Image (cartoon, coloured by chain):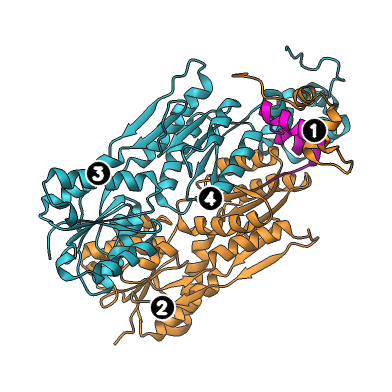
């Protein structure tokens, strides 16, 4: 092993001239009281030797360390970092630390993190954003979670109703449908949807909700263009949409990007093409990311209470276990801004 | 004192015992432990039953108790909501991944107490090494980590002495680049918007601004130092209101902001007040985060090699973990100015 050996409890006991049991009681607390002068001697010895209790050893004895693992698909996406912030603030109130695991949407990485958290005896795991329609991946994650739960761990998921754990369900369908109805109410008639990959559930749900609302209100289905679920994806999809519209005369008057990041990419594409967002073309997103509240023009979107979603997920994993799987539904709220002015 | 493993303690069940009891190969037991997805459910259940019967300790806590470490690194970051740090994390992740290690991210959220709790926990978990953008680079807890055998690399901060590797960007140079760019464009009155002064980078970028200003022979009172509480979008907006409040002859024609979030807030405030960028106010940010190019008026910014910063930091850490003859290094990256519409061409 590299470097000096870390001090052990035996070292501390020897240094303080007390028994191992007394050292342990002085450091870890116990029903049996340690005389104050002995306690002081043990603490001084521990400090002198730089002793820290080994969390792994403690975890084996106690069954869990005081951490919560949070798996997110992409920590650079403000959607996830805001959820993470809400969860971490709530965790702190319970004396828990959050270990953030960035999966990049890769099943192998997700599995590696789950295994590592299980090994570390993390007290709970929250999964956010691996909601893929890939059945094999979902069942692999479910297996890993099951063995974690068998070992006494607790887990919850955000927006992944297919996993066998308590879940915070985001009403993507309803939020997008409400947005479609409001846009029709503002006078828009020809819509297109910029979607993410088709196997991404969150994107598929928002697309379907918007299409349903639009169809019911106008009798026609919106067009759609698929690309990456990112700013660059939104920019590319919008560029293609503008080109196609010019080529075949099927220009739209309003565009719904299935998340705010794609919407920001769409705004950039419009700027590049010389299309003025608002007066010439309406653009709306979904999520209401705080950083983007400052873009110009202000982006119409569906606001999700992201920090609350993080808090709710933590409440689920810390609350009393229940025999039945629990679902907590979260609804979005349409926020109209300058990017979708009333059509005159 | 030499420690003989296992001496005098009853031998616990081994993988071999489990394999023999379950009637499977060693490889299958190993797969059940490490790659359960490769094993059929019935085989897995048989092996797990054998483990339970024999009292086999299957979790890696036991293994890491023997080796004293787990196969992961951690990055203790200052703000998981700031794209700068998540890009740094991405660079670290790439290097960790190619070394076969997992990377845990711990967000101190700029709070010393939370940072201290994370560091204590990581040390207890025996992670291979820690990368940190510390709240306070001179925090003695960092020295304690090293003394107790956990390698630490300081990211995006520097500290006196050389008991650590560190990776940072030359912020004085960055400040100079920004202000020289504005001087070249003909600005004679410029504001530096930054704060709080307790952040080393805010001071260094301001120092670079002053140096460039002095070298151009411009009067010091025409470089207006506008201090703000935090490097956030909200404070950038507040700074915009204060600039508008200045008497016309004192009002700057350009602003250099200590980071992009401030610059975006200032940009938003300026435009919503009916003034134009760069016509009424040219703006330079710092960091070149992704949103800088996507702003209403694409933002001129000082770009830092964020992923390279993270990657190099992780490489130094891995070297320290693996090489007993490791020498500490202080790596300083050079920033570059990316000129965009917020300072170019007056409409």
Q: Which mark is residue A336?
A: 2
Is there a contact, CB below 8 Å, between mark 3 and mark 2? no
Residue extending furthest toward the bottom = A344
- The lab-note entry on whether marks 1 and 2 share a chain reads no
Q: Which mark is residue B47?
A: 1
Residue bounds of the magenta highlight: A37-66
List the residue tagged with mark 4.
Answer: B111
Q: Residue at x 25, y 40 (%)?
A: B173
Is there a contact, CB below 8 Å, between mark 1 and mark 2? no
List the residue tagged with mark 3.
Answer: B208
Q: CA distance from mark 1 to mark 3?
A: 65 Å
Subunit that carries the residue with mark 4: B
Chain B takes which shade in the image? cyan
Q: CA distance from mark 1 to mark 2?
A: 58 Å
Q: Is residue B283 above or below residue B321?
A: below
Q: Earlier in the sequence, mark 1 or mark 3?
A: 1
Q: CA distance from mark 4 to mark 2?
A: 35 Å
């Amino acid at each position: 092993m590299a470097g000096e050996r870390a001090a052990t409890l035996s070292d501390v006991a020897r240094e303080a001239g007390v028994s191992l049991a007394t050292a342990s009681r002085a450091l870890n607390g116990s029903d049996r009281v340690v005389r104050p002068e002995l306690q002081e001697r043990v603490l001084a010895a521990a400090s002198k030797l730089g002793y820290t209790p080994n969390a792994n050893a403690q975890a084996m004895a106690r069954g869990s360390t005081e951490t919560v693992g949070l798996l997110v698909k992409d920590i650079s996406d403000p959607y996830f970092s805001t959820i993470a912030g809400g969860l971490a603030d709530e965790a702190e109130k319970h004396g828990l630390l959050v270990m953030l695991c960035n999966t990049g949407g890769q099943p192998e990485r997700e599995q590696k993190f789950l295994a590592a958290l299980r090994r570390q005896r993390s007290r709970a795991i929250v999964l956010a954003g691996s909601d893929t329609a890939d059945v094999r991946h979902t069942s692999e994650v479910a297996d890993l979670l099951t063995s974690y739960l068998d070992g006494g761990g607790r887990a919850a998921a955000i927006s992944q109703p297919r996993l066998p754990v308590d879940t915070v369900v985001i009403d993507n369908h309803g939020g997008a449908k409400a947005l479609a109805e409001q846009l029709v109410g503002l006078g828009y008639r020809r819509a297109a949807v910029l979607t993410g990959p088709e196997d991404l559930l969150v994107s598929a749900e928002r697309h379907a909700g918007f299409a349903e609302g639009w169809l019911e209100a106008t009798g026609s289905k919106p067009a759609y263009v698929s690309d990456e679920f990112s700013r660059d994806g939104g920019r590319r999809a919008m560029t293609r949409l503008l080109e196609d519209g010019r080529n075949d005369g099927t220009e739209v008057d309003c565009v719904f990007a299935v998340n705010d990041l794609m919407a920001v990419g769409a705004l950039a594409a419009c700027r590049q093409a010389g299309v003025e967002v608002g007066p010439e073309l309406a653009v709306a997103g979904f999520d209401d990311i705080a950083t983007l509240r400052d873009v110009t023009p202000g982006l119409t979107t569906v606001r999700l209470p992201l920090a609350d979603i993080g808090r709710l997920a933590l409440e689920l994993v810390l609350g009393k276990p229940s025999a039945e799987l629990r679902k907590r539904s979260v609804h979005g709220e349409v926020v109209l801004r300058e990017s979708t002015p009333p059509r005159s | 004192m030499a420690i003989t493993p296992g001496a005098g303690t009853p031998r616990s069940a081994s993988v071999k015992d489990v394999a023999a009891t379950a009637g499977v190969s060693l490889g299958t037991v190993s797969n059940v432990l490490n790659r359960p997805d490769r094993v059929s459910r019935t085989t897995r259940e048989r092996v797990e039953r054998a483990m339970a019967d024999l009292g086999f300790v299957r979790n890696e806590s036991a293994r890491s108790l023997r080796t004293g470490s787990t196969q992961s690194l951690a990055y203790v970051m200052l703000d998981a909501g700031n794209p700068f740090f998540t890009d740094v994390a991405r660079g670290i992740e790439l290097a960790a991944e190619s070394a076969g290690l997992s990377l845990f991210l711990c967000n101190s959220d700029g709070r010393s107490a939370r940072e201290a709790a994370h560091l204590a926990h990581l040390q207890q978990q025996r992670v291979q090494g820690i990368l940190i953008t510390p709240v306070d680079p001179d925090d003695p807890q960092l020295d304690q980590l090293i003394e107790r055998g956990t390698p630490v690399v300081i990211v995006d901060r520097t500290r006196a002495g050389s008991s650590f590797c560190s990776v940072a960007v030359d912020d004085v140079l960055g400040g100079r680049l920004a202000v020289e760019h504005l001087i070249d464009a003909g600005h004679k009155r410029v504001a530096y918007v930054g704060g709080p002064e307790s952040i080393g980078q805010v001071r260094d970028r301001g120092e670079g601004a002053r140096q460039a200003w002095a070298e151009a022979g411009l009067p010091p009172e025409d470089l207006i130092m506008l201090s703000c509480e935090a490097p956030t979008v909200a404070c950038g907006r507040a700074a915009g209101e204060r600039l508008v409040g200045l008497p016309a002859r004192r009002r700057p024609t350009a602003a250099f902001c200590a980071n992009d979030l401030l610059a975006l807030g200032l940009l938003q405030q300026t435009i919503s007040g009916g003034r134009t960028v760069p016509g009424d106010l040219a703006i330079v940010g710092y960091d070149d985060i992704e949103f800088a190019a996507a702003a209403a008026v694409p933002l001129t910014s000082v770009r830092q090699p964020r992923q390279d910063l993270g990657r190099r930091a992780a490489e130094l850490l891995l070297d320290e973990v693996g090489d007993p003859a490791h020498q500490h290094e202080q790596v300083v990256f050079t920033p570059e100015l990316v000129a965009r519409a917020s300072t170019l061409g007056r409409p």
